[in-house]
Amino acid sequence: MSNGFDLIIFDCDGVLVDSEIIAADVESKLLTDAGYPISAEEMGERFAGMTWHNILFEVEREASIPLSASLLDKSEKLLDLRLANDVQAISGVPLALSRLPMPRCVCSNSSSARLDMMLTKVGYLKLFAPHIYSAKDLGADRVKPKPDIFLHGAEQMNANPANTIVVEDSVHGVQAARAAGMRVIGFTGASHTYPSHADKLTDAGAETVIARMADLPGIVMALAEWDGVL
């Protein structure tokens, strides 16, 4: 790997845009109102990186509370409104990208429409378009922690998964990237981070964890020079 990586893949929510904290706020209120009291902080720690559909399924299984199907649509509409108004960029992304010479793309569980909206709002769309891929376009059963979206991204970019590096903020995302045979840098620089965040990402398979995008180019360079794969 002395020649560097073929590709760097970025998750979007919690890596490029500070959206996970907004989703946690919206979803915690909906679940609390439905009879499952949970704080936004707990949402971020337990469910970051999961789709709302899978969160509802997990809560129903755990608490034996039948959750209304209308919660699916209600959350999507509320969250789109909040994100359109409130989502902020993760700082330092353009500078980090300017120092990363390899091709790049985005692989996310969010829908293509939401990815387009969020990245446009924070001014990052032009940094990645047209190489922005949504797991939902592959099918509802192919979202992270399954590796499908990462493998799809590598295929679209003609990259070898074993020579691809992923930047992820969630345990499910790290697990998906590792299942795809890729190397992973964990990221804890978004507002939804919590005290054991870095440890959980490392336990899931991240080789190292950063909290600032400014640190990304140096870490990628260091990992590219190290031939060992965990």
Image: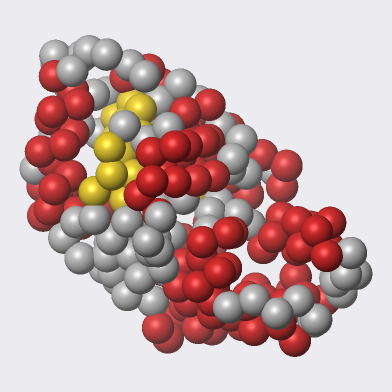
Left-right relation of 56 to 164: right
Quarter where residue 25 is shown: bottom right
Left-right relation of 4 to 37: left
Left-right relation of 146 to 157: right
Which image quarter is the N terminus in?
A: top left
Percent x, y of residue 32: 71, 82
Residue at x-position 16% and y-position 60%: 92
Residue at x-position 40% and y-position 54%: 197
Nearest to the observer: residue 3 or residue 170: 170
The image shows residue 34, relative to residue 181, as above or below, that is below
Percent x, y of residue 88: 32, 75
The image shows residue 29, relative to residue 152, as above or below, that is below
Percent x, y of residue 151: 50, 28
Figure label count: 0
The image shows residue 174, relative to residue 7, as above or below, that is below
Q: How is the image coloured?
A: secondary structure
Left-right relation of 190 to 143: left
Which image quarter is the C terminus in?
A: top left
Percent x, y of residue 99: 9, 43
Quarter where residue 14 is shown: bottom left
Would residue 8 be seen by someone viewing this image from the given angle?
yes
Residue at x-position 14% and y-position 19%: 225
Would residue 129 be seen by someone viewing this image from the given angle?
no
